[in-house]
Amino acid sequence: MGKRSKAWLEQFTTDEIRELRAIREHRAWLTLFVNYGLIAASMALVASLPNVFTVVLALFIIGARQLGLAVVMHESAHYTLFKNRKFNDFVGNWLAGYPIYLSANMYRAHHLEHHAKTWTDGDPDLSLATTFPVSKASMARKVIRDLLGITGLKKLIGTTYLVVKVIGGEEVDSGTLPMRMERRPAIRMVVGTVLTNLILLGVLWAFGHPLLYLLWFGAWMTTNNLVARIRSIAEHAVVPDSGDPMGQTRTVRAGWLERLLIAPNCVQYHLEHHLVMTVPHYNLPKFHAMMRERGLLEGACVADNYVQVLRAAVA
């Protein structure tokens, strides 16, 4: 780590870092409420005004909020969701991870290794960044595959195939999946995913609109994969200096529409997250503002919007 990468820390006091790392549990509940509230509102909109426009809008909002739930699960993987670690994992799994076929327990080992070995040969997420930039035709194919559900189908089949093998006692390489496969967490993830999705279907059935579940599953198969891809590109692809923490990952100054449809729960502040990975998501905007006010983001990897990021990712 060079002098430039350490310079930012010299501009912060121990008390300031401690305050940034402070867990405020009511903010975690608020995040969950907002994400599920937007999902419920999207479904209610389609129920009251069923047409192509409302369905497409709902699919994009729900897909983004499913990414929002993944962010909550990611938060629990860092033990920054709730102070009690057992409760932290319970909420991270049952209210965030399991409904979207993820597990905080299996994600944690994979993700913490990514933080420890960012942009090295040992980084498990390295292949997600090194394939860029790509051609316009290649990017168009990726977007089409995402929106047609091809990516989602591959994810569903691939994850299920590996989980079944792990439950059967086989050792597998999880490949590009953001999980380290272990038998007991895998069983809990499958059971949790089935139960939480049945509960969602049951709630919608009780309200007289069981077909609205198709919006949830449809978004998971389509728009969620597109926004997850954009997020992944923005975080580590086509960065200026993979050897410097100030240049190896990117923060995006997202506008309100991007925050609604692409970057939920402050996920756009990835540079700050990598500098101090135990800062809860709701404190990242403050961290970013402090860095900016102290002139520490000059020359750092910061984009003005996601359009700018995608232009850089297309050769």
Image (tube, rainbow, N blue to C red):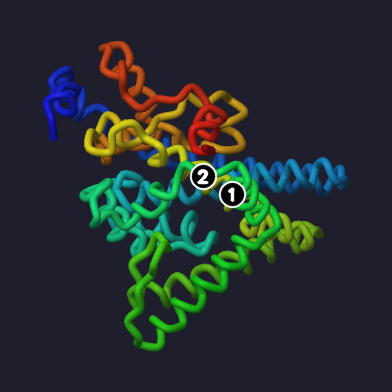
Q: Residue at x 52, y 26 (%)?
A: 305
Q: Dot 2: what SS?
A: loop
Question: How far, Cα to Cα, is label 1 from label 2?
Answer: 6 Å
Residue 87 shows up from this direction:
no
Q: Where residue 59 sits: x, y (%)?
A: 70, 48
Which residue does the numbered mark 1 point to in the structure image?
Answer: 138
Which residue does the numbered mark 2 point to in the structure image?
Answer: 134
Q: Where residue 81 sits: x, y (%)?
A: 35, 45
For badge 2, the amino acid type reads Val
For badge 1, the amino acid type reads Ser
> Mark 2 and mark 1 in contact (Cβ < 8 Å)?
yes
Q: Residue at x 36, y 29 (%)?
A: 284
- Asked if residue 123 is positioned above or below residue 35 in the image, the reply reads below
Q: Where residue 279 sits: x, y (%)?
A: 29, 36
Q: How many marks?
A: 2
Q: In the depicted view, which residue is nearer to us: 166 or 285?
A: 166
